[in-house]
């Protein structure tokens, strides 16, 4: 059998959000490359998938890439997953895909859940365009990032963590106090909610209820 690299999308929260095709590909894989074996292990256990797990994150070495490509060339079926969502979208995987393509090996994508499109759908914003910016820079370029948001006419979507959401709201209030925000929190999980208002309004809400500062956030900025 010809070897192949399969890019498999996994649930972004609710483990039931996985396709039948993804389950089949994971079961057939000789091994699964993943960011965190503990996280992926929970998913595989739920669906009784016994595939071998190998850690693959942003710190993967050049030798790791070469070994994976050699395995594919030898006929192995290898699946690449991230902790949540689609590999290569704001997480590791881009370099491996690029090198695998340059090496001429077969690559396929198994589509699935997306925090970006899920948040946009839940927001109910009119229009058919948006810009996705990934994660907010942690240090260098952070101020420039927020200053640049005002130049977008279409909605802008980015990710933020529980540790920096308040800091981000302060920056948004400084630079875009009149823009409407749609912030999806804990998408597909038990405490899923959509926060809507200005940065100042949402900041006040989260400061009043610290428990709502926890979770994963998808922020949508809709400039006036």
Image: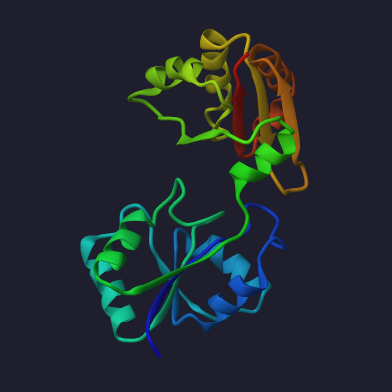
Residue 203 percent location from the top left of the image: 66, 17
Q: In which quadrant of the rendered view does residue 64 lie?
A: bottom left
In the foreground, 67 or 96: 96
Query: Viewed as shown, does residue 148 lie left or right of 210?
Result: left
Residue 122 percent location from the top left of the image: 73, 38
Q: In which quadrant of the rendered view does residue 130 lie?
A: top right
- Report the residue at 66% width, 52% height from top: 13
In the foreground, 9 or 53: 9
Q: Quadrant of the C terminus?
A: top right
In the rendered image of this protein, does residue 178 appear above or below residue 126?
Answer: above
Query: Viewed as shown, does residue 60 lie left or right of 28?
Result: left
- Report the residue at 59% width, 42% height from top: 116
Give the number of marks.
Answer: 0
Q: Residue furthest bottom?
A: 1
In the rendered image of this protein, does residue 87 appear above or below residue 28?
Answer: above
Q: How is the image coloured?
A: rainbow
Q: Residue furthest front?
A: 128
- Report the residue at 36% width, 54% height from top: 94
Residue 89 percent location from the top left of the image: 46, 49
In the rendered image of this protein, does residue 72 appear above or below residue 126?
Answer: below
Residue 29 percent location from the top left of the image: 48, 80
Q: Quadrant of the N terminus?
A: bottom left
């Amino acid at each position: 059998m010809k070897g192949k690299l399969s890019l498999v999308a996994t649930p972004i929260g609710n483990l039931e959000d996985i396709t039948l095709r993804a389950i089949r590909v994971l079961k057939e894989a000789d091994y699964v490359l993943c960011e965190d074996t503990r996280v992926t292990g929970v998913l595989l256990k739920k669906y009784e998938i016994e595939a071998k797990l190998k850690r693959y994150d942003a710190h993967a070495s050049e030798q790791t890439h070469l070994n994976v490509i050699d395995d594919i060339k030898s006929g192995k079926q290898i699946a690449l997953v991230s902790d949540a969502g689609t590999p290569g979208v704001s997480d590791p995987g881009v370099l491996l895909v690029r090198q695998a393509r340059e090496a001429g090996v077969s690559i396929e994508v198994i589509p699935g859940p997306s925090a970006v499109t899920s948040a946009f759908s839940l927001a109910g914003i009119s229009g058919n365009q948006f810009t996705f910016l990934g994660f907010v820079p942690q240090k260098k370029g952070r101020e420039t990032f927020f200053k640049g948001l005002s130049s977008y006419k279409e909605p802008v979507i980015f990710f933020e963590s529980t540790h920096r959401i308040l800091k981000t709201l302060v920056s948004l209030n400084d630079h875009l106090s009149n823009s409407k925000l749609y912030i999806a929190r804990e998408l597909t999980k038990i405490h899923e909610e959509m926060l809507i208002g200005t940065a100042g309004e949402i900041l006040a809400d989260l400061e009043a209820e610290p428990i709502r500062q926890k979770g994963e956030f998808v922020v949508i900025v809709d400039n006036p």
